[in-house]
Amino acid sequence: MEFPLEELARLVGATLVGKPAGPIRGVAGLEEAEPDEIAFLANRKYRRFLDSTRAGAVVAGPDVREARVPLLRVENPDLAFARIAERFAPEPIRVPPGVHPSAIVDPTARLGAGVAVGPLCVIGAGATLGDRTVCVAQVHVGPHATIGRDVLLHPLVVIRERVRIGDRVICHAGSVIGSDGFGFAEESGARTKIPQIGTVEIGNDVSIGANSTIDRARFGVTRIGAGTKIDNLVQVAHNVQVGGNSVLCAQVGISGSSRLGQGVILAGQAGVAGHVEIGDGARIGGRGGVTKSMPAGATWSGYPARDHRIVLREQAAVARLPGVLRRLGVPAPPGPGTGKKKRDGRVSTATHAPKRR
């Protein structure tokens, strides 16, 4: 498969700078690209590779004025490269419409036109699968679950009973939608399970990563808004509400009954305590721990999470502390192996405050 560079430029509405040497046959990173491949530059920290890349062309933003290789200048290099990469992507998963002989489909389940149910899948009583939905293999759809059109369920996905999923949703391998929320009542040191009788609603065009879990509500609905993208190993607890077009990166955890607005971004390993509200467009940095509600448009990080600018100033101040202590004449703590020996031969590295005179 190959395309003239001029055709790729037209595809993404780019301005072509420089003379193409030949057709493009693939995509790659700046460091690895060969002369018949196209790369992209969206992050400034990779700009140093622009002078040494062997790529046949580079997709870049309008701030990149020239390079030793042809440029496709666009406003959004990420989006443009994604559209170009689609031209070279392998064929998507094709599961022929119909029910595989090893699958188990309850007679009361309703399958739309062009539905594909792959090997060892189980479709429960009263479940509904919309037109052209694909269950690749070993997918479990519980009783009375409702799944929309053009949904793709990768192997080992579990959709529990009464869950409702919109159109064009992708669930990657091992994700579990509608597992019981974590709720127990304590009495005399023993814990009794609280029934989780609610459900989960997933909006249209949501993507759910591998081994991510979304718990059903204790009562009512756990809801994921349309267009939200969820990475791998994410935990969304019972009764959480996530607004549309939000992004939850890897290993994010959201505790019960918290509410996230539209377009919220949680970076990797960020955590949200229960019963807090996060406003529209808010962003939480990696490993940030949100313990209280935060306003719309805010950017927080650290633990407990607070204004990112304050966190940066605090980190800079801590980095300067050793120099400040030296100027004040405060002795440095002893290093490894420099402690005083006790009578029993053990080494003590303890430091003590100076005695008052």
Image (spheres, helix red, strand yellow):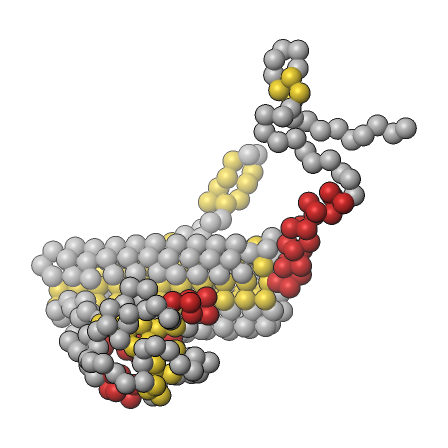
Q: Quadrant of residue 279?
A: bottom right
Q: Which residue is drawn at 44% across and 54% down?
A: 251
- The answer to which of 35 and 300 lies nearer the viewer is 35
User: Where does the image place residue 47, in percent across and percent down from the top left?
Assistant: 42, 70
One can see residue 223 in this view: no
Q: Which residue is drawn at 19% across and 58% down?
A: 137
The quarter of the picture where the N terminus appears is: bottom left
Name of the residue lying farthest toward the top: 344
Left or right? Give the position of 88 relative to 180. Answer: left
Left or right? Give the position of 145 relative to 1. Answer: right
Using the image, determine if residue 103 lies above or below residue 151.
above
Left or right? Give the position of 353 relative to 77. Answer: right
- The answer to which of 87 and 263 lies nearer the viewer is 87
Q: In which quarter of the image is residue 62?
A: bottom left
Using the image, determine if residue 10 lies above or below residue 43.
below
Q: Which residue is drawn at 21% across and 63% down?
A: 135
User: Where does the image place residue 72, in percent across and percent down from the top left?
Assistant: 34, 82
- The answer to which of 222 and 264 lies nearer the viewer is 264
The quarter of the picture where the C terminus appears is: top right
Q: Which residue is drawn at 57% across and 55% down?
A: 289
- The answer to which of 13 and 40 lies nearer the viewer is 40
User: Where does the image place residue 103, in percent across and percent down from the top left?
Assistant: 15, 58
